[in-house]
Image (cartoon, helix red, strand yellow):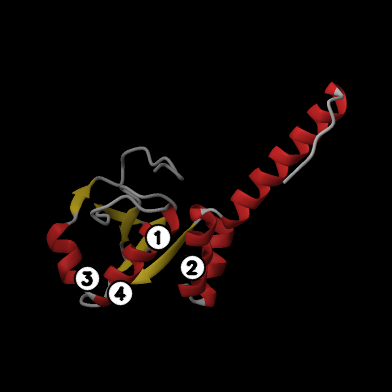
């Protein structure tokens, strides 16, 4: 496949370059990158702009019309907003099996937009006043 000379310096540089190429390929084509691309395809242009600028996007619940903000992460990353668009209640819900961050966020978006009542029946509320660590998984 790849042939490397026995010269230690050249071989070391070649191996470093190969590792960098592999890391770059994985960053662009690994599960997290694929999940992020799929999420972005499902976001509206407004949601995509919010996500790019702030690391979160907002959705409207299908039953109540309430606004929810979905932050990047997999747990305790959904905040219900009040009329002033400030956090009112946090909601923790996620798929039963482990998924990439983008896939979890997409599942949360679809669930709130299509069956808000079922989501709220299983979600665990938490205080949005607790320190929020953006990007926590």
Give above or below for 15 relative to 28: above
Give above or below for 30 relative to 46: above
Callout 1 environment at 10 Å: few (<14), some (14 to 19), or many (20+)? many
User: Do callouts 2 and 4 mark residues in contact (Cβ within 8 Å)?
Assistant: no
Residue 103's label in the rendered image is: 1
Nearer to us: label 2 or label 4: 2
Q: Earlier in the sequence, mark 2 or mark 4?
A: 2
User: In front: 1, or 22?
Assistant: 1
CA separation, marks 2 and 3? 22 Å
Callout 4 environment at 10 Å: few (<14), some (14 to 19), or many (20+)? some
Q: In which quarter of the image is residue 2?
A: top right
Looking at the rendered structure, the secondary structure element under dot 3 is: helix
Identify the residue at horizontal 52%, vertical 61% (top origin). Answer: 34
CA separation, marks 3 and 4? 6 Å
Q: Position of residue 22 (x, y in %)?
A: 66, 45
Identify the residue at horizontal 28%, vertical 73% (top origin). Answer: 61
| Residue with the mark numbered 3 | 116
Q: Earlier in the sequence, mark 1 or mark 4?
A: 1
Looking at the rendered structure, the secondary structure element under dot 4 is: helix
Residue 120's label in the rendered image is: none
Looking at the image, the residue that sits furthest to the left is: 121
| Residue with the mark numbered 2 | 38
Q: Which of marks 2 and 3 is nearer the N terminus?
A: 2
User: Do callouts 1 and 3 mark residues in contact (Cβ within 8 Å)?
Assistant: no
CA separation, marks 2 and 1? 8 Å
CA separation, marks 1 and 3? 18 Å
Q: Where is residue 69 in the image (x, y as percent from the top left)?
A: 38, 61
User: Do callouts 2 and 1 mark residues in contact (Cβ within 8 Å)?
Assistant: yes
Q: In this view, does 111 lie to the left or right of 48?
A: left
| Residue with the mark numbered 4 | 113
User: Do callouts 3 and 4 mark residues in contact (Cβ within 8 Å)?
Assistant: yes
């Amino acid at each position: 496949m790849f042939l490397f000379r026995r010269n230690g310096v050249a071989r070391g540089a070649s191996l470093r370059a190969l590792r960098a190429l592999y890391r770059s390929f994985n960053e662009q084509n690994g599960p997290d990158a694929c999940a992020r691309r799929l999420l972005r395809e499902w976001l509206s242009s407004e949601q995509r702009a919010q996500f790019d600028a702030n690391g979160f996007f907002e959705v409207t619940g299908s039953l109540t019309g309430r606004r929810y903000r979905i932050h990047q992460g997999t747990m305790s990353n959904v905040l219900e907003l009040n009329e002033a668009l400030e956090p009112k209640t946090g909601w923790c819900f996620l798929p039963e099996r482990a998924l990439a961050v983008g896939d979890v966020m997409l599942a949360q978006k679809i669930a709130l937009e299509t069956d808000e009542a079922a989501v709220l029946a299983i979600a665990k509320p938490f205080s949005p006043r607790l320190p929020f660590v953006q990007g926590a998984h």
